[in-house]
Structures are given as C-alpha cells and as structure tokens.
Amino acid sequence: MTNSNRVPNRLLKEKSPYLLQHAHNPVNWYPWSEEAFEVAKAENKPIFLSIGYSTCHWCHVMERESFEDAEIAEYLNEHYISIKVDREERPDVDHIYMTACQAMTGHGGWPLSVFMTPDKKPFYIGTYFPPATKWGRPGFIDIIRQLQDKWETEQQQLILASEQMVKSVQPRFTAFESGQVEERIITRAYKQFAADFDEMYGGFGGAPKFPTPHNLMFLLRYWKSTGNEDALNMVEKTLDSMYRGGIYDHIGFGFARYSTDQQWLVPHFEKMLYDNALMAYTYLEAYQATERDEFRKAAEEIFTYVLRDMTDAAGGFYSAEDADSEGEEGKYYVWMPMLVHDILDFEEAELFCKAYDISECANFENTNIPNLINASFVRLAHEYGIEQAELMERLERSRQKLFETREERIKPHKDDKILTAWNGLMIVAFAKGAQVLKRPIYQDAAAEAIDFVMNNLRRDDGRLLARYRGDEAKYLAYVDDYAFFIWGLIEQYEATFDAKYLAYAIELQEQLHELFWDNDAGGYYFYGTDGEQLLTRPKEIYDGAIPSGNSVAAYNLIRLAKMTGRQDLEQRAEAIMEAFAGTISDYPRAYSYFLIAMQFALGGSREIVIVGKPEDIQTLNMLDAIRSSFLPDTVVVLCSEEENDLTSAKLHELAPLIKDKSAVAGKTTAYICQNSSCQAPVTDIEAIKQLLSSDNQQINL
C-alpha cells in the first residue's frame, strides 16, 4: 500500500489515475516530459522508463515490491532519471517501446520496464521484475545495479547497443508490404481460424484466452457472404462459452479482460471499457444473425453494467475497473456457499449455488467464481419440478439480492479518465443497440457521449484530443481516437438519421487524412504531423485486443463513400488496403478487422435510401425490417419528406446520391442499390424483406 504521508513526487500534479497511484512512491518519478530528458542529459544519467496503467495487477505488484522499497528507490534516485507513463494516455510512447520489447525478448506485457539513453534509445527492456533475484529470474535491484555499472564503465557500448536496437526494430514500424486486395486472403484467414478453433470450449488456441470480438465479427461476415455454417457455429460456440464462463460477471454483468485458462473460468478480473463495447456490439450482430434471445440478453446486461458503473454524469464513459480490491485479485467477485446462505433462504441458496458452481470444493483459490460452464437450466428445472421460466425468475431474484450485498464490499479502483478512442467504441455499441433493440435509452447514451467528446475533447480549432479527466483535456488525439469515434458517429447516424452526425464524421475524417496520411506509402500514421516526434513515426495494422486505427478507418471510409457517393473516400479506403495487403497475406487471421473492410470492398454492397417522414409508421416499419436483419454490407440513409427539415437539407449537401429521390404516391419509399445495380423503388414491407433476404450478396470464396 502506498504511503500517502510521504512528501509527494512530481506525479502529484498529473491527472492520470495511474500516475497519481505512484505520486507518493519514494522514487523521484518524472512524467514523460522534456524536463526529464534535459536533466538526464545534463547529469549524464540513464533513464528508467516504467509504463503501465491503473488497473494492471502486475503493475500494482511491482509498485509494492520495488517502487515502495526504500533501498531500490534510493538507488534509482541517485543513479537514474525515472519516468512514469500511463499507456492509455500515451499509446504512442507505449507502442514504440512495447514493439521493441517484443522484438528483443519475444514477449511483452505490463508493467513495461525500459532502460534507455537520455535521447530515448532503449538498451535493455523487460516487463515485470521481482525485487530480488530468485528461481533463476533476475531481480530488479540487481538489474539496476548491473546496468548502472555498465553505464559507468561501458557507456559507449550501451549507446551503440541502443542505436543497434533502434535500427533493428525500425522496420517493424514502417516496413509494410503493399499488395492486391484478393479474396484468397479472406479464405486463408477463415482456414486459419478453423484450424485454431477450440471445439470444446470455443475461442481460438489455448490459455490465456482473450475475447477479441472482431475475430467473431469477421466470421459472422464470412458466414453471411459464403453460407458456411461452420463459421457461424464457431461464433455461437464462442459467444455461448464466454457468457457462461467466469470471465463474465454473472452477479453485476460485464466482461473481464481475459481468461487465464482454456475454458473461460478464471479471468484476469479487470474490466476494460473497450472489451465490453466490442462484446456488446458482437452479441448484437449475433442476435441479428441467429435471433437467439440469449445474445440479446448478453448485450443488454453489458449496457446495464456500463450505464450503472462506467458512465460519467456528463455523459462520457470511464476507462476501466481494477482486478484487485483490498490488495487481492478478484476478492470483490468471489463467493463461498456460506455467504450465499447468509443472504438467501436455504432453498434459494442451494439452487443458486448449484446453478452457478459455488461449492465447498471451490473453483478458484479456495473460493468460487460464479459461472455456468456446466450448468443445465433444463436439468435444474426438471430436478426442482418447475418450468424453466420460473427457474430463471428465481435465479434472477437471487442474483439481485447477491448484487445488492456485493455493493457493500470494498470495490475495485475505477479508472475514471475518459478516452476518446474507447468512448468511440462504446458509442458504436450503444448506437447499434438502439438500432437493433429499439431502446431510446441506448440512443440517448450514445448522443450524450458524442456531445461530451465534441464539447470537451476538441481544441478551439477543432483538433481532436485524446484524454479528459478533472476538467482537463490533454494529448493530441491518435489515429485510434479518430477512427473509433468516426465509427461511432456513423453508427449513431444510422440510429437517428440526424445528419449532424454524418457531418461530424466527414469533418473528422478529413482532419484525420490531413494530419495522419502517409503520402509516400499510404496508410495512416499512429500520431499526427503536429504530434510529439518520437524515435519513429509508426503505423499500426495489427488487430490485437482492439482493432487497429487503419483497419477501422478503411471500413469507415467505405461506409462513408457508400452513404455520400464520394468516390474519393472509397479510393482512400482502397489505398489503405493496398498499402498493407502484402503484409497481412501470410497470416491474415491476425488482422481480422482489416479483413472486415476487405470483405466489404470485395463482396459488393447494398445502399438503401429511404424517403419518408421519420416518425411515420410506414417509415418505422421499414427501418425495423432492415434493422432486424444481419446486413453488414448495407448502409442506410433516410431522407425526410417533411417541409423545412434542416436535417434533410444538410443531408442533400452531404450525400448527392439522394438527389431526385422522392416518395412514391405519398408512401414511404425505399430505393435499394445492390452491387452497382439499382432496383425499382418499393413501398411494400414484404417486398423489401424479400430483397434483403436474397442471396445476391453471396460470393464464392
């Protein structure tokens, strides 16, 4: 536990929750700043750079073991300039040094520990280090002593090593192979997913397992375009298994960051906004594709969690919740039968424990993570002689009582900074929820978050910013901030058909292109021309825990092009895909969101323009017919027939494709163009359903 009675270091003036967690360490921390590097140069000291985030379990461990240790702190203060970075505030810094770590050691993770020269070039990198050497693993105190000795006696060799390290890593940031966008790449990706699929537990590969929802989004689209049922089965099995597992919080809802085991039982308990946003979106798409009510329920529960626990009063969304409480990982989330019996009457407690695998045998460190991995509601209903609907009602009443009691526990730390990128993803999910589930509250949540970003995370000149906390907006937005927020604006346009959202999306897309585009090789850089110039100016295409900015930007551009009829936007999307197509071709499953953009480009598209009054029952019925179907290749534009409609006037300015389209015989009318071929306008709902369910979109892969 950090001693808050100590004289604080420089981090006390920062806004980042992560940096503030270290503000009372005895280590003389600097934030990432020119001051730190100037002092290092003036005093000829190496730099120790520590990168992490506020909900990182092993970051907490290293703080307790090393950064709170008086001997280690004294040595660092005498011989090093120590810098702390919140990776969520400075993903540009994190990306560069994490890539170097992975290149040098073959693995990565947080906390990230970097030893480097005063000119920011690394010469030794690792992740978590124990305080003292044991079990053959070097201890932190020994590492800092040995490296300091080398700095004193072999400084030129370390400088040379740092230069060689930078030179060897440089191609990973910029050396991408261009190529042609080809259907065979999509087919190869599907086969790689199929080869890695875990048929018993869902997901791909072994432990640890990450949700990575965009993998499932790709497979849903593959199923839709090819009719391959195995692709759909992989999606359903994985979504079922994740929801049933302990990675899902069955008491308070929401997904943890990943599972440490193969069957999704034991999570790393921290909850990230981005995971829950992408999971909600994927469950909604799966619900559209399968009409399975449990997928709808999963999405609604995630939204309940986010609105209850992760939403600021002003409308923005918080970043994360910690894995630890009271110094123990997962303590807030686990149960024993005795605790359940203290809250529920005997029969209800027995039923709940039996359903959710809570027993004296324990399933996690002498306690229990509620889960449904081996549960059968049909069997339980039969055992208790009740209908399944009654069983579910009883379990839900019990869950609510357990949740109310759990609320009295000491809660995990909440990282309440508001990030533009992650808010963009949550806006995407809520806007999608508004469309699919017809819940105005979701549309309102997306609208309030958009207003928050537009009002609080932009400079006066319109430049987007990355982080807001404590009335301070800071850091020039990165490519992910732009791409994810634009994605959210597009989804919110299709939820509301308010043209201002489309206008915002186009405005920010132009800003992204102006500041981030690589005029020589194509693609978007990670940070803009006006950003801090680091060791290199990287580009990212790998779709890891979240999609890359380039992947999402390509998809956004195609959608915007289809909505507006602007060929220049489609050409930009093509340029992105061609810039990276060679790189992704060997192992395309690592670029699943990039593949989603490719699927859209290769498989053709469907543009629907609806002309009618927005609140007219015919218009609403027509929209319901469209939104109830899984149509990932479709964009929808609504043109109001109401007089003096400012939204309609703005739309005509943004989207010339609606020109000359009018309602037929005073009825709400749909104009459907598919694969560059337009159908006759239709006013009949059944005719629209028939057109939407046609097989014309399938391609042979």
Image: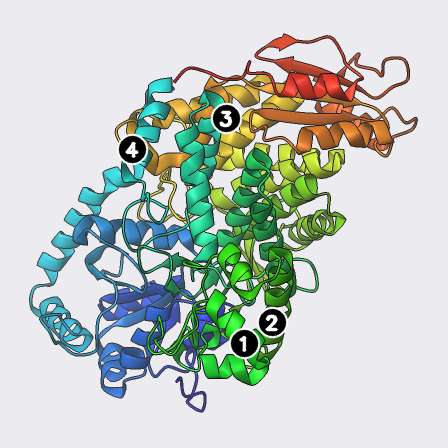
Instruction: Say which of 55 and 28 sits in front.
Output: 55
Q: State the residue position of label 4.
A: 192
Q: Circle 4: is it few (<14), some (14-19), or many (20+) Cα within 10 Å?
A: some
- Residue sitting nearer the eye, 1 or 19: 1
Disc 4 residue type (three-letter):
Gln
| Pointer 2 or 1: first along the chain | 1
* Residue at x 41% of width, y 58% of height: 373
* Residue 292 locus on image (x, y percent): 57, 42
What residue did someone put label 3 on?
224
Residue 108 location in percent, x, y?
26, 55
**In this rendering, is residue 113 above or below 554?**
below
Q: Do we see residue 252 in this rendering?
A: yes
By what rule are the colours in the image chosen?
rainbow
Residue 629 in percent (x, y) is at 63, 30
- Please report the residue visible at 62 percent of the width from the left and 57 percent of the height from the top: 387
- Expressed as whole percent of the image width and height from the top left, the position of residue 700 reads 41, 15
